[in-house]
Image (cartoon, rainbow, N blue to C red):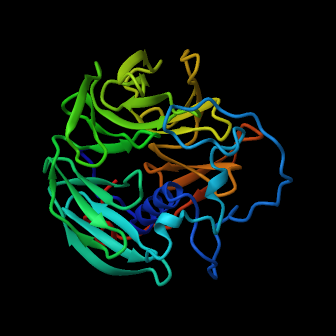
């Protein structure tokens, strides 16, 4: 959400960014003394699976039944081997990015960036981390090998940022401009600006074949279906709740469903992306906001930031199984962090 209070838990924010970076980097880091729940998956027999007719230029889907199969431990992409293990936390109120060593849980650096950084997003080729300076109208590049920030790139209203699965375009979620702006993934020059027809384009995720993606519109309570190649809005659906405020979007491991967190509905909408029909609702907790799939693809973690809890959703059983309550920290400890 754009106008936020400081997040109560810096550690929770760090964990969120760590999960996002690990997922984007095609796996996890080396062995560590501590392992997250569900970090070790059983060995599965190799079977022949049907191929997915993916977006041209997109890497093939290894396992159509599990889009997150490459996120297992010790499966880092060769592109990032040798990079130091770091967590990058955007601090919206202090216009900085905090860099944390996850092995020692210590802050190793604080990087000044542009005004109101919202997210830190790995590029499609994993060679750059882009800091989305929303009100600063810039992207700050960070070299993940050295941790050094480069010269900011002028990009208007970059609330959030995604890369198309074929690596051709960066898609800027221009929230206040009410646009999806497709830019060249390397130069960041505008290729096409697409009117969203809704207010507060926010988060997104791609279909199994990469041919479309689902977008949440935070301030108008809409969700969009967008054609990736044609760069065109295919459909728009108003969530069936007055005051709905959709946030994070995540595709299911089998690619059949999309989950959309809603911080005002206090739960998650479950959508059939192919059919794009009326979604059903699952209550999780107050202020449902972030969605993260476990390393073994069995569960999804839902951050309920309005009550300081994390709900655990089991994909196979299609239900919530437990809820973790985070410890309380003083306001001083959380001041200056972003969402």
The answer to whether residue 176 is above or below residue 45 is: above
The number of discs equals 0
Q: Seen in the image, is 63 located left or right of residue 115?
A: right
Residue ID at (73%, 65%): 40
| Image quadrant occupied by the N terminus | top left
Specify the quadrant of the image occupied by residue 239. top left
Q: Residue at x 47, y 56 (%)?
A: 20
User: 218 or 112: nearer the eye?
Assistant: 112
Residue 268 in view (yes/no): no
Along the viewing direction, whichever of 166 and 330 lies nearer the viewer: 166
For the point 57% across and 32% down, which residue is it? 54
Q: Is residue 116 left or right of residue 267?
A: left
- In the rendered image, the residue lying farthest to the right is 45
Inspect this view and state whether residue 82 appears. Answer: yes
Q: Give the percent coordinates (x, y) of residue 282.
A: 60, 32
Q: Which of 157 and 76 lies nearest the eye of the viewer?
A: 76
From the viewer's perspective, is 80 left or right of 169?
right
Q: From this view, report whether residue 184 is shown above or below residue 217.
A: below
């Amino acid at each position: 959400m754009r106008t936020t209070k400081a997040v109560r838990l810096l550690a929770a924010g760090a964990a969120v960014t760590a999960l996002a970076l690990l997922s984007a980097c095609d796996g996890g880091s080396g062995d560590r003394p501590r392992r997250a729940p569900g970090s070790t998956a059983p060995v599965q027999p190799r079977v022949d699976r049907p191929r997915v007719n993916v977006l041209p230029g997109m890497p093939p889907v290894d396992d159509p039944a599990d889009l997150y199969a490459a996120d297992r431990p010790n499966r880092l992409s060769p592109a990032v081997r040798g990079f130091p293990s770091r967590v990058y936390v955007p601090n919206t109120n202090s216009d900085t990015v905090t860099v944390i060593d996850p092995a020692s849980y210590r802050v190793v650096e604080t990087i000044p960036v542009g005004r109101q950084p919202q997210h830190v997003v790995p590029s499609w080729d994993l060679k750059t981390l882009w800091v989305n300076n929303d009100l600063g109208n810039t992207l700050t590049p960070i070299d993940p090998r050295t941790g050094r920030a480069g010269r900011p790139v002028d990009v208007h209203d970059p609330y959030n940022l995604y890369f198309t699965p074929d690596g051709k375009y960066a898609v800027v979620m221009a929230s206040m401009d009410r646009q999806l702006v497709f830019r060249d993934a390397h130069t960041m020059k505008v290729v096409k600006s697409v009117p969203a027809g809704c207010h507060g384009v926010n988060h997104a995720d791609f279909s199994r074949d990469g041919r479309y993606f689902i977008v949440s519109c935070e301030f108008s309570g809409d969700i969009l279906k967008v054609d990736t190649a044609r760069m065109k809005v295919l459909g728009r659906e108003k969530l069936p709740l007055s005051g709905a405020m959709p946030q994070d979007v995540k595709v299911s491991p089998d690619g059949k469903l999309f989950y959309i967190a809603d911080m005002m509905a206090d739960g998650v909408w479950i959508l059939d992306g192919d059919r794009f029909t009326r979604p059903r609702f699952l209550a999780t907790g107050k202020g449902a906001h972030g969605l993260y799939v476990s390393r073994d693809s069995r569960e999804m973690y839902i951050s309920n930031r309005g009550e300081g809890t994390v709900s655990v959703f089991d994909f196979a059983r299609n239900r919530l199984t437990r809820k973790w309550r985070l410890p309380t920290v003083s306001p001083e400890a959380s001041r200056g962090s972003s969402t």
